[in-house]
Structures are given as C-alpha cells and as structure tokens.
Image (cartoon, rainbow, N blue to C red):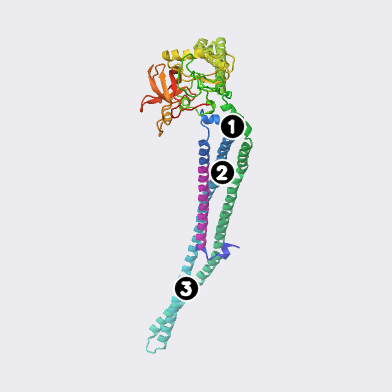
C-alpha cells in the first residue's frame, strides 16, 4: 500500500489532504491550549473560594475554629486549595509536554511538506517540458512529411509534362529530394525525442513521483502517530495527579471523621458557662400590711439604695431570674470592654483573665530572651572590642529591662484580678463599691465605664450600677427598642435621689428631687425606664431614683 503507486495521479488531492492534516493538528493544539486556560481559571476560582471562607485573623471567626466541625471545614478549605494546585499542575504539564512540542512540530511539518510538494511540482514541470518537446518534434516531422509529399508530386507532374524544360524538371527533382531529406531528419529527431520522453515518463511515474509521494505518506503517518501520542500524554497528565487528588479527598474524609460532637458540646460549655448558681425560691411578700419592699436573699437581683427608705404604693419583687432572660440592650451593647473584664460572668471572666496572664507571660519570656541575647552580645564586645562598642548596647538593655518590669506589673495586676475571681482574694464589700460608684464617678468619670460584676457571698451575681460605670450604647441598636412601638403606660412614679446627666443615647437627664413617671421597671441590668412628658423618656440608673409602683396601673404585675 503506497501512495506512489495507488495515488500516482492524485497530486492535487494529496496536497489538499496534507494541508487538512496540518489544520487538524493546529486545531488539537488550540483545544489543549484552551483546556489549560480553563484549568488555570478553575484553579484560580478554587483558590479564591478557599481564601474567601478562611477565618480572618484576630477575629471572632478565628475563635470559632476551636470546634472540631469548624476545624474539619478549615481542613476542607486547605485540601481544596491543594486540589486547585493540582489543576495548575495539569495546565503546566499540558503546556510543557503537548503545546510546546506540537507547536514546534507543526512548523517542521509545514517546512517538510513544502519541500516535498516543491520537488513534486519540479518533476511535473520537467515531464511537461519533455512532452512539449515531443509534441513540437512530432508536428515538425508531420509538416516535413507533407512538404516532401507535395514536392514529390510536383516533381512527378513536371517530369510528365513535355512542355517543361529539362532544367525545371531537374530543379523540381532536387526540391523533392531536399524535402525528403528534411522529413527523414525530422523523423530521426522525433524518434529520439520520443525515446527520451518515454524514458522520462517512466522515471516520472515509476521513480520520481513514487519516491516523493512515499515521503509525503511517511510525513502524514508521522503526523498521525504524533497526534495519537499527544492524546496519550493528554490522558497521562490527568492520571499523574489522580493520586494527589485522591490524597486531598482522603484528607477531607479524614477531617470529616475527626469531628467529635461531644468535644464540641464541651467547648460550648467552656465558652458560655457563666459560673452562676441557679436562683433559689422567691419568698412570699405580704402586701396586706404597709411595709418596705424586701428582696429575697436567694434572688439574683441587684440590691439598691441600702439604708434608704423606699416608700412604694406596691410593686413586684426585685428577685429576677435574669441570667435566663434576655438582658436589656443597654447593658449588652457596651462601647468599651473594661480592663478587668468585669462585665463578664465569673467563669468567662476567669477564662479571659487567665488568657491575658498567659499572653503577658509569653511577652515577658520573649523580652527576657531578648535581654539574654543582648547581654551575651555585650559580653562578646567586652572580650573582643574590635567587634563593637559594649556601651552601645546599654540603652537597648535598659529599654528591654523597663519593658520587662512594665509587663511584670501588668501581669501581677491581672493575676490579682484572677485570684479575686477564683476566690483566693476577698472581693470588695458592697459598701466600698457603692462609695466608689458615688464619689469616684463625679471626680474621675472616665476611670471605668462598665458595670462592676462581683459574686456575692451567697453565690448570686450582682451588678453595682453608678455614674462610675455608665455604659456606652450603640445608637442604632438602642433606638430599635423604640421603633414602631406604642407608648408605654406609666406603672408608677419615681423621685430622683441624685442628679444624673444623661449624655449617652437612650438615657435621660434628671435633677435631684425631680418626680417622674416610671414606664418600665429595672429588669436586672441596673436601669429603670422613666418618662418626663410625652416626648422625653429614657433610662436612668436604678440606684439614682426611688421608685413608687402603682399596683393597679396597667402593666404592673401582681404577686400572690
């Protein structure tokens, strides 16, 4: 099966077919190139997706990744990132092993094809030239034969005519002989050219064209083999990353299997445990006889106005189950966190303080390591003065020592607070806290702007509220409390015991001795909602007012 023998007369069709083969090869290169672009785009999108859901540093999200389910999700994100890397590897290998090689091969193929068909056209032109020479000699031989025949006929006519002179007959005879000689010469020339053409034609159809077409056939077969090898490489490039992709998927499965629901439940306890004891029973308060409102010893409510008479027309008990009730937004939305984390429940406060102490100890150790390094360097300078001036390190050594001392003082402060929470140090008495709230708030209102949280001797949790610990409220959240709400009815009255400057959003200013309407009782957060008129209402610290509830007013609760 040879193109030279089977397709000896299909030169033009072979030329078209080989050009089509090159077009197919270039089309395949374009296909692989677009595949590499898709792989890169897919890898980029996977990486962006993984990055998008990575926890932000120093954010609340980072704390959530303590849970095993979140850790498994983080592992999934990391494995997805590695999976994206394998698609980048596919793109790189396709480019290096297929596209680059085939691009060079196409250029070489075009040059080889051009050379073969140039030789073919050259052979065609040669045989066509020989054919033209043969035709020319054939026509000349035919013409000379006709001329010789006519000259012979003219001579015979002249020789038979008795009226023609002998000289004219002789002339006609010579002319006929000359024409016969020319015909013989043309015949010999035609015969020679014919033999030569037949030889060239045999060479053309049995040697030159078969050789050229055989080379073209081999070239085309190499092209077909090359594109087949490229397709195998195309599959092998994908196959090479399958083990690594499998490891990525195994990593995701392993991360999923590592999820421990019990451990996550324990972490929830550690994260949100307040350390409060459940509240005890509320004592019955008998309102059939005039008496002061009393507070249950076992309740968790805040004791207000100790030592002050609070004549009331009636009301509800101060004992509330507020650790289990949603707190007022005013007490939750704090503008700043106190340094000693006193705004947190005992257990959470202890954890925060312990974390702060550990951080400070790490910083102290870091500074001590730096001091040791500087000291060693100074010793080296003392032994080898040419290496440096020992005095140049004194300033740095002093600075590091001062930093260590500051950090130690800071650590001692937090350790003292930690000891207080853990019960190793006595907490401040209620009377001391109250005095601090009344006087320190007037002289240094910026010392501490958050509620001081302490554990009472019976284990209940109280919040002392004064001008010292006014909270800063987020305006938008606080205002939501009043949006689209009906005006609350008055449930009693109150008298201001002290002057209060309501500078924060949601609060209202009162003057000592002023009488106002109570529209919402203290819910355990240390604030009472009051109204001056239809347009002026807000919160004031409960300890700043003396409340008189009307038990018959709408909204007032009754107790049995």
Percent of width and height locating residue 449: 45, 19
Nearest the viewer among 433 and 477 is: 433
Residue matched to label 2: 90
**How far is disc 3 from disc 2 in space, using C-alphas?**
69 Å
Q: Where's residue 14, x and y in %?
A: 52, 61
Q: Nearer the viewer, mark 1 or mark 3?
A: 1
The residue depicted at 61 percent of the width and 31 percent of the height is 265
Residue found 51% across the figure and 72% down from its top: 191
User: From this viewpoint, which residue is outermost toward the bottom?
Assistant: 162
Which residue is label 3 attached to?
Answer: 138
- Front of the two marks 3 and 2: 2
The residue tagged with tag 1: helix, strand or loop? loop
Residue 206 seen by the camera: no
**Which region shows up in magenta?**
13-42
How far across and down, in percent of the image, does residue 232 sit?
60, 50
The kind of secondary structure element at disc 3 is: helix
Q: Earlier in the sequence, mark 3 or mark 2?
A: 2
How many numbered discs? 3
Front residue of this view, candidates 292 and 5: 292
Q: Which numbered dot is residue 98?
A: none
- In the image, taking residue 166 as reference, residue 74 lies left or right, namely right
The image's mark for residue 67 is: 1
Expressed as whole percent of the image width and height from the top left, the position of residue 223 reads 56, 54
Q: Indicate whether 339 appears above or below 486.
A: above
CA–CA distance in space, label 1 to label 3: 104 Å
Looking at the image, is mark 2 or mark 1 earlier in the sequence?
1
């Amino acid at each position: 099966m040879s193109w030279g023998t089977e397709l000896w007369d299909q030169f033009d069709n072979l030329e078209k077919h080989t050009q089509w083969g090159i077009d197919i090869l270039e089309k395949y290169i374009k296909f692989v190139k677009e595949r590499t672009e898709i792989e890169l785009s897919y890898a980029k999108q996977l990486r962006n997706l993984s990055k998008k859901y990575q926890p932000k540093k120093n954010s609340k999200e980072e704390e959530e990744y303590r849970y095993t389910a979140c850790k498994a999700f983080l592992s999934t994100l990391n494995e997805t990132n590695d999976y994206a890397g394998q698609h980048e590897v596919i793109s790189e290998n396709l480019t290096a092993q297929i596209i680059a090689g085939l691009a060079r091969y196409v250029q070489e193929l075009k040059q080889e094809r051009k050379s073969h068909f140039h030789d073919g056209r050259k052979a065609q032109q040669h045989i066509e030239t020989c054919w033209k020479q043969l035709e020319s000699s054939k026509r000349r031989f035919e013409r000379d034969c006709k001329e010789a025949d006519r000259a012979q006929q003219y001579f015979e006519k002249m020789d038979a005519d008795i009226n023609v002179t002998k000289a004219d007959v002789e002339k006609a005879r010579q002319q006929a002989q000359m024409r016969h000689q020319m015909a013989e010469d043309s015949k010999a020339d035609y015969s020679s050219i014919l033999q030569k053409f037949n030889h060239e034609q045999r060479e053309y159809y049995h040697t030159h064209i078969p050789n050229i077409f055989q080379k073209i056939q081999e070239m085309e077969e190499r092209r077909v083999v090359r594109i087949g090898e490229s397709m195998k490489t195309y599959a092998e490039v994908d196959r090479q990353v399958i083990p690594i992709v499998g490891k990525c998927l195994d990593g995701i499965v392993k991360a999923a299997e590592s999820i421990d629901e019990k451990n996550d439940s324990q972490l929830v306890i550690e994260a949100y445990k307040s350390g409060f004891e459940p509240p005890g029973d509320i004592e019955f308060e008998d309102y059939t006889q005039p008496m002061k409102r009393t507070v249950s010893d076992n309740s968790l409510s805040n004791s207000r106005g100790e030592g002050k008479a609070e004549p009331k027309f009636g009301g509800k008990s101060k004992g509330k189950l507020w650790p289990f009730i949603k707190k007022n937004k005013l007490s939750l939305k704090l503008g700043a966190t106190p340094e000693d984390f006193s705004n947190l429940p005992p257990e959470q406060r202890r954890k925060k303080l312990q974390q702060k102490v550990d951080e400070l100890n790490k910083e102290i150790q870091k500074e001590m390591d730096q001091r040791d390094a500087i000291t060693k360097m100074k010793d080296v300078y003392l032994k080898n003065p040419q290496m440096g001036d020992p005095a140049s390190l004194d300033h740095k050594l002093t600075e590091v020592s001062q930093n260590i001392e500051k950090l130690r003082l800071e650590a001692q402060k937090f350790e003292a607070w930690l000891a207080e929470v853990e019960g190793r140090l006595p907490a401040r008495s209620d009377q001391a806290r109250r005095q601090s709230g009344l006087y320190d708030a007037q002289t240094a209102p910026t010392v501490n702007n958050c509620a001081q949280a302490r554990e009472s001797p019976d284990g209940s949790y109280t919040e002392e509220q004064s001008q010292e610990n006014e909270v800063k409220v987020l305006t938008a959240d606080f205002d939501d409390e009043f949006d689209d709400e009906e005006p609350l009815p008055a449930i009693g009255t109150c008298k201001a015991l002290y002057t209060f400057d309501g500078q924060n959003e949601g609060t209202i200013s009162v003057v000592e001795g002023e009488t106002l309407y109570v529209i919402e009782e203290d819910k355990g957060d240390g604030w009472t909602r009051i109204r001056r008129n239809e347009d002026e209402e807000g919160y004031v610290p409960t300890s700043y007012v003396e409340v008189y509830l009307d038990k018959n007013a709408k909204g007032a609760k009754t107790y049995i």
